[in-house]
Amino acid sequence: MKKLCTFPLVLLSSVVFSQYSISEIPQDGYLKDFDIAVDIIQKQHPNPYRFHSKEIIAKKIDSLRNIVKKDPGYISLLMNNPTRIIGDGHSSFSADSNYFESILSSLYFFPLQTYVQNGQLFVNGSNPYAIEVGNEITEINGISSKELLQAVPKAADGNIKVEDIDVSFYIPFILKNRTNDFSLRYKTSNGEQKTLKVKGIKYPRFYYESRHSVLPVDLISENAGIYGYTIDSDTYYLSVKSFSYDESFFYERLKKYFQEIKDLKIKKLILDIRNNPGGAISNVPLLYSFIAKDKTFNNEYKYGTKVVDINYNNYLVDPQTNRYYSDKDIADQNNFMRQRFDKAEKGDYYFGNSRLDNTYIKSYPRDGAFFDGKTVLLINNRTFSAATYFASLFQSEKRGSIVGKETGSCSNFTTAAWFLTYRLPHTKSTISIPRTEIFFNSDDKENVANCKGVIPDQTVNTQFFLQALKEHKDPELEYSLTLFSK
């Protein structure tokens, strides 16, 4: 098993069409699956009470359960599933793609693409209503944009504030009237308040429009994974959107770009890990070795968990094949963990031993093709897991300025490394639970300090953001260029 530090499947993000009917789900099936999911979290999560006490979690679960009980249905279950309240961005609850076809086909989506910046909701693309890009939406169907932002499901650790979310997609799931009409209030660039009624669009059109919004500008990197180019004779832009690569492949790609940087005698580097959900944690120091200031740097992390064995055996599936686990599969997984985790002398934790990771190098050497010029790192709320560890390493080594938004996972630890996936029996929804926590920078205390993501040194103010948005430019990238001139 390869250890991964990954970001989970995004709620409702992927759709595979098939001939399933949601009407075949019994009405009490939604509440039953909710209760099963709660049981799985309580018995299998490596530390479900990291951020909230048992009493607080119980109250939050009761509140969500009552919503599902009063309004049993697929949307109700997805929007109020129990993974929302434990504060673990790696635990996820996902819709069955086949059932979800009927949900998508029944909804009308908000026809304007949006982007959230500094807590405000802005129009993020052209539209047939002549609402300018950058106009602020303040209310939709009587619900304020602030309330909408609070209602959208978010993947984040602890209580990290997240605004990198697709509000437009979730609007029909949040609104209760499921209407084809949307009434909105918005503010023009000169401060004028306006109201307007707009018609909803079906999902295929919505998906098309989402690919033609202004932000994010850098779509090539999202497809290529690793992509770089010169901005000017002195400045290079390198985007790394994942750490989920074979180490040999990852090294060859990085070597190619950093050799080009060296050959061109580049003096300034913008390294972009926004929207990077993580991957193999061993690839983090590999990337940093190309920009390290010293010949070696400290690369330290430790795996820990309170739950070594698989304690909830029912409904376990292989997410790649959808095959249910056999007794042998479960025994093999238990043996794997027992061989690689030892009980601590004090407390409830098991920590990874020397058998766990043969790629671990504490004092990591700098690569021969290293870059020693000025560097700016771009991060956002979707910088997650192993990518957050990279940002934390960059910050602790004082390698340069960090621009953007707080990372979505904690700067000193995260949950991840192997996952257990359960397919719930009534709705075929899946719940994914990480097996361990990973502590960065020698922090293996049972009560880690309050979770904060990596905090950027510089954030883009609203005025600068709007100017870049109207010019169809990347705000963080443009702002980074101004830092080099200071």
Image: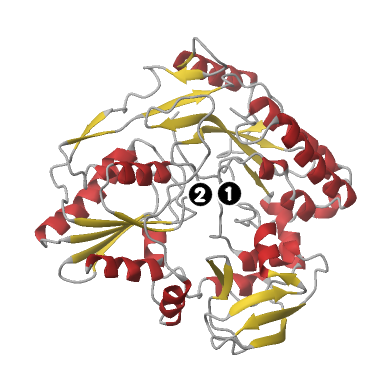
User: Is residue 454 found left or right of 419 in the rendered image?
Assistant: left
C-alpha span from label 1 to label 2 = 7 Å
Q: Residue furthest top?
A: 345
Quarter holding the C terminus is bottom left
Residue at position x 67%, y 52% in the image: 97
Across and down, in percent, residue 196 comes to: 71, 86
Quarter holding the N terminus is top left
Q: Does the image show residue 443?
A: yes
**Location of mark 2 (residue):** 408
User: Mark on residue 352?
Assistant: none
Q: Looking at the picture, which amino acid does disc 1 mark?
A: Ala
| Sooner in the amino-acid sequence: mark 1 or mark 2 | 1
**Location of mark 1 (residue):** 155
**Circle 1 — which element?**
loop
Q: How is the image coloured?
A: secondary structure
Looking at the picture, does residue 437 appear above or below residue 154?
Answer: above
Across and down, in percent, residue 186 comes to: 65, 81
Residue at position x 59%, y 19% in the image: 309
Residue at position x 67%, y 58% in the image: 150
Disc 1 and disc 2 in contact, CB within 8 angstroms: yes
Residue at position x 75%, y 61% in the image: 103
Q: Nearer the viewer, residue 224 or 83?
A: 83
